[in-house]
Image (cartoon, rainbow, N blue to C red):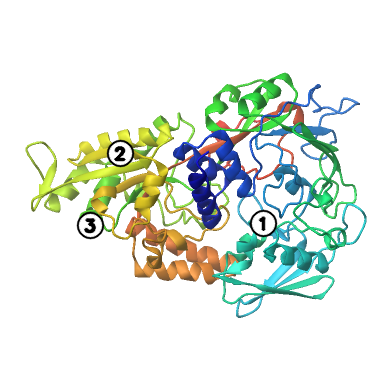
Amino acid sequence: MDDSLVRSLIQEARTRHYTRRTILRRAAALGLSAPAIAAVLAACGSSSTKTPAVGGGTSAATSATGTTAAASGSGGIVNANTTLGDKGIGNPIIDQSEYWTEWLVFNKLVKYDDKGTQIPDLAKEWKYSDDSLTLTLTLVEAKWHDGEPFTSADVLFTLDKVKDSNTKTNYASRLQVGDKFVTWEAPDDRTVKITLSEPYAPFLYGLSQIAIIPKHILEKSTDINTDPFNKQPVGTGPYKLVEWQPDQYIKYKRNDDYFMGKPAADGWTNFFMANTDAGAAALDKGEIDMMFTPPEMQPRYQKSPDFVLHNYVYYTPITLAFNHKHPILKDMTVRKAIAQAIDKKTLTDTVTKGRGLIANNQYATTGPLDKYNNYKEVDYQKEYPFDVAAAKKLLDDAGWKPGGDGIREKDGQKLSFTLLTYSGFTEYMNDQVIIQESLKQIGIEVTPSVLEYTTLEGMWHDPNGKPEDRAMEVQEWPHPFEQDPDVYSELDSKNVPPGDDYMWFQDADIDKLIEQGRTTVDPNARIDVYHQLDVARLKALPALPLYCAVDGWVVSKKLGGIPADTPSFRWYQRAFPEKIFKQA
């Protein structure tokens, strides 16, 4: 295992708040081994990838009486799987904790629905002070699984433990604004007040990542990192953990006293499996009822009589990013001509095998950031329609004339650019080829280059790098939080290299909107700010959104639908109804 690469990716993932999907993409691009990838996932809050066996037996999609298991309260046990392996940690604030246990057994103060809207969890309501520096949360009446009451003391205990440097947790940064920890207090059993050093709208997103743990069980622990609680967790969530067979499965039973009402299913069993191929075999045999399915596996289920493929959109588009320090690409006319020379529909259909969505806005359509898209005023297809003749005319009018070899020239310079991406993804390399051929039609020479991820990363953060060496890139820039639209780190002028604005985009008006967006805590007012930012980015074209990737869950028709408790499931039926199969 290359320890330096692992350490580098862990630091990168924590700093930039990568999702599991992004971590896996980066790890593959680096060529990391399976054990190395497992180490990164574990250190960033996911479990590692061991090679466990299926627990065996027949599907529990039906109960002992034969009734179907539950998408909406009809009872039964739901069988699912995970390919992240078993780390044996059920405390959700500790590194390497078990993801399904966090989701089913515990609650956060707030959470997000599938449209990215903040909704109540253990906090039934919250409000910022007029100066946006004090966040007051009012808590629900709830009980821990052992019958003890949940109070504000549990919240303070949890936040104290996350802040404690002796706790092996990657959530401490969620309690910081800038480099300062926020402070917290509890005026009474049902109220928590958090004080920030400055207004910071993404703070609620950070808070939504921290599950609350019980003070009365853990306050006397000599080492929370190794406490027996880690194997026998007690939460406030919809299900109780009742059996844990290492490297085989975890069983959860319905919590009949759940404060949000009766959960849908009688329980869940989550099997540890080696990979998605093992999961598919178990799914086909009826040993599990549902599983997360990567794009390459989805076609086998698309017309299945026994299963339903439910797709959802990855939250940020793949883009063609421009280096704005490049002396030619600084010219908006050139960037506009490039945008109009690319047939995004053909590109999308080709590289995603017909399973992607053309990106016409900054955030993925119907993903959790969808509401920040300004559909009334922003449409990249309309602003930069595919039109080769118009693209040629733009370059003609700007003085770029075809040379003897067909490549346009002006003042001794050629319209010739490098187009980079990182290794490990055939999809991105196919993007390069299509873009190369598209731009050749209008007299622009493109030289594709595929680099190791660490090599490209070093170029990103080199303030003295030559822009000609990195003119354009196929990647996911700019890259916000998964459920928060903030793009400060990658698009604000203050963060040019060695910072994360590695495409050297600088625009004073856009900087103002970014700052306004991250300091506006009123949700509706914040949407308005990002709608303005959507328009500004359309006109400035820091990067051209190309397409959105599509992930999915495959679900047995026995379930009657996606169970409401399924972790992190997001619909995209509104955008792509022709590829959602209706259930019987």
Q: Nearer the viewer, mark 2 or mark 3?
A: 2
- Between the residue at mark 1 and the residue at mark 2, the CA separation in whole angstroms equals 38 Å
Image vertical order of residue 116 relative to residue 158, above or below? above
Q: Position of residue 247 (x, y in %)?
A: 74, 33
Q: Amino acid at mark 1?
A: Thr
Q: Which residue is mark 1?
A: 169
Mark positioned earlier in the residue sequence (1 or 2):
1
Q: Position of residue 310 (x, y in %)?
A: 62, 34
Which one is in front, 214 or 35? 35
Answer whether residue 194 is visible to the viewer in this image: yes
Which one is in front, 179 or 166? 166
Element at label 1: loop
Q: Nearer the viewer, mark 3 or mark 1?
A: 1
Q: Which residue is mark 2?
A: 449
Q: Is residue 90 left or right of residue 463?
A: right
Q: Amino acid at mark 2?
A: Ser
Q: Residues within 10 Å of mark 1 (few under 14, many from 20)?
A: many
- The residue that appears at 64% across and 58% down in the rendered structure is 171
Q: Which residue is mark 3?
A: 331
Element at label 2: strand
Answer whether residue 319 is visible to the viewer in this image: no
Q: Position of residue 22 (x, y in %)?
A: 52, 45
- Between the residue at mark 3 and the residue at mark 1, the CA separation in whole angstroms equals 46 Å
Mark positioned earlier in the residue sequence (3 or 1):
1
Q: Amino acid at mark 3?
A: Asp
